[in-house]
Amino acid sequence: MEGLVFILPIVLIVFFLFLYLVPVGLWIQALVSIGWGQVPMLKLIIMRIRKIPPRQVVDGMINLHKAGLKDIATDDLETHYLAGGSLSKVIYALIAADKANIALNYATATAIDLAGRDVQEAVMTSVHPKVIDCPATGNISAVAKDGIQLLSRARVTVRTNIEQLVGGATEDTIIARVGEGIVSAIGSAKDYKAVLENPDTISRAVLDRGLDAGTAFSILSIDIADVDVSKNIGADLQTEQAEADLKVAQAKAETRRAMAVAAEQEFIAKVQEMRAKVVEAEAEVPKAMAQAFRDGNLGVMDYYGMKNIQADTGMRESIAGPGKGEGGSGQGSKPPK
């Protein structure tokens, strides 16, 4: 009796360990659903040891076989799981692609999944194209040839390109390229009225540029959702240019005025310098006359004759113009020192 007490726990532990390592229920489910030999018992035990959830592998195999995809083995599913992929998304994507007649094999599906893309969403987008707002928020600003600014929004209908999904550009690239194409198309228009009258010309011009090259999508259509007239950029630029030209002209005129003032002051200084030299020369005349008297080179009669000439000159200047002869008569009335 005492031995039975010790043996019973061991038997229970071994029994539960056997049930854990040997998922009999899954094996029977696989046997009934997909036939004998598709998922051997030993394979399920090895999955347990390798820490692979047998339930995901068995359910995936059952779904694939029921959908008619019988060329995928359990080893393929195990390898993808160990690589860090999502078995459920890959399996659902393969089934959906097969039902929609989309060319998608297991290798491509697993590569897309391991690349970080949602392969299930990619297949759904291939079946049901989605619409991308361009830009995501706000408006695209562009200026026509007449200088009028237009604000526009576009809606881009895209479908996933399965072949280019791995390594292809994302939605942000599509939005950037479409925005660039809209700016170029509006900028090529002769005036804003032409854009407002036929906004579909923008769509055709953008589609003809092949903007989906190298991306993970195929552009089906580009629809201009809204076009608004903003402001006259050309007039604003011309006004700003005119103001800038005016400031430049004023600066140049101020420079010329300053140079003229400087030249005028320079001439005035030269005149003052010459007048100073004249005054200095006139100051030497009385000294020379005094020296002539002392040396006997100038007589009294000569002096009075010079005084008469000065008086006559002063009288003539006073007759010619008022005030002009005062200086001469005044200078002549003063006897030499």
Image: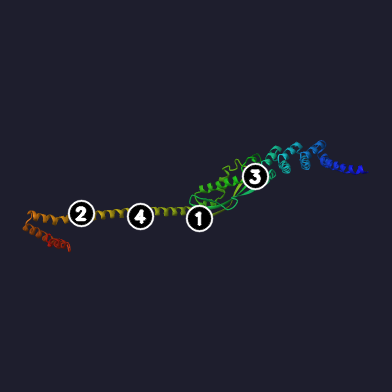
Q: CA distance from mark 1 to mark 2?
A: 70 Å
Q: CA distance from mark 2 to mark 4?
A: 35 Å
Residue labelled with disc 3: 159
Residue 230 point in image, percent of width and height: 52, 55
- Assign a secondary structure to mark 1: strand
Residue labelled with disc 2: 277
Give whichever of discs 1 and 4 has the lower sequence position: 1
On the picture, is 240 further left or further right than 30?
Answer: left
Give whichever of discs 3 and 4 has the lower sequence position: 3
User: At label 4, which amino acid type do we have?
Assistant: Glu
Say if 35 sits above or below 171 in the image.
above
Question: What label does residue 231 carry, if any?
Answer: 1
Q: Nearer the viewer, mark 1 or mark 2?
A: 2
Residue 6 in sight in this render: yes
User: At label 3, which amino acid type do we have?
Assistant: Arg
In front of the other: 122 or 77: 77
Q: Does the CB distance between marks 1 and 2 fall below 8 Å? A: no
User: At label 1, which amino acid type do we have?
Assistant: Lys
Q: CA distance from mark 1 to mark 3?
A: 36 Å
